């Protein structure tokens, strides 16, 4: 009789909730704050004004990210809870129909009809609601919405991301501020793309190019607008 060997698997899907919020927050923190700094710097040469604008952007952005993430993910959570209650009522009132529905789901996935019926019966006997939430609705413990986690993660990573271009304002000469913040922020974005891709098991170069390109575009547009406004004023 052969011995069974342990086959470890490192799946990363459990990270999608907080990783999405973290990458979104840090990316938005770098891009929005750097764009704001570049835009203001292009319109005025006063470093103190640029710094005040950057700090205001950091605080407002972190609060906005927290509130936005909490509200949007709470909406997702409310929908999931409503579906759960609806499914619970259907299981209570129409158990046979739900058993047949689950059987058909397994059949469409390639399980033989007789075996699909047996599997459905056993799965529902153990955890009918959990089985239907997972196999019928695609909702599981791994992917369920977590509003507080998303809000805190986004706010914290936004503040960290925003602090990077703000730090460059402190160490950069006033006449080189636009270029220093722009180049440093693009490097920060490239690093963020690489770290996020590595944490999620994705291709590093693709994520790095994606965040760097859109960050450069955002900063170029705001710098142009800032220069136009500064010239007009």
Image: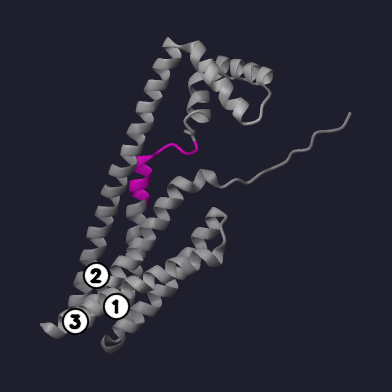
User: Which span of residues is magenta-colored?
Assistant: 142-153
Q: Secondary structure at mark 1?
A: helix
Tell me which residue sits at (42%, 18%) in the image: 88
Cα gap from disc 2 to disc 3, whole angstroms:
20 Å
Cα gap from disc 1 to disc 2, whole angstroms:
9 Å
Residue 73 visible to the viewer: yes
Question: Is 103 above or below relative to 2?
Answer: above
Tag of residue 101: none
177 within the magenta span: no
* Residue bearing the label numbered 1: 169
* Quadrant holding the C terminus: bottom left
* Residue bearing the label numbered 3: 228
> Which quadrant would residue 148 be assigned to in this image?
top left
* Residue bearing the label numbered 2: 54
Left or right, 207 with reference to 122: left
Which x, y percent locates residue 208?
49, 67
């Amino acid at each position: 009789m052969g011995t069974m060997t342990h086959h470890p698997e490192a799946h990363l899907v459990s990270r999608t909730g907080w990783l999405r919020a973290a990458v979104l927050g840090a990316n938005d923190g770098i891009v929005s704050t750097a764009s704001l700094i570049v835009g203001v710097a292009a319109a005025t040469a006063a470093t103190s004004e640029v710094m005040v604008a950057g700090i205001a952007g950091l605080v407002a952005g972190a609060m906005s990210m927290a509130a936005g993430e909490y509200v949007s993910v709470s909406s997702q959570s409310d929908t999931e809870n409503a579906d759960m209650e609806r499914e619970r009522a259907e299981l209570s009132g129409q158990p046979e129909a739900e058993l047949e529905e689950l059987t058909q789901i397994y059949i469409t996935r390639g399980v033989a009809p007789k075996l699909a019926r047996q599997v459905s019966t056993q799965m529902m006997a153990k955890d009918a609601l959990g089985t239907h939430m997972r196999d019928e609705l695609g909702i599981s413990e791994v992917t369920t919405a977590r509003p507080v986690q998303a809000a805190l993660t986004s706010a914290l990573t936004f503040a960290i991301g925003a602090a990077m271009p703000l730090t460059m304002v402190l160490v950069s000469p006033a006449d080189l501020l636009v270029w220093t913040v722009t180049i440093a922020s693009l490097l920060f974005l490239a690093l963020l793309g690489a770290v996020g891709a590595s944490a999620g098991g994705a291709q590093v170069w693709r994520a790095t190019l994606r965040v760097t390109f859109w960050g450069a575009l955002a900063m170029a547009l705001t710098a142009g607008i800032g220069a136009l406004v500064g010239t007009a004023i």
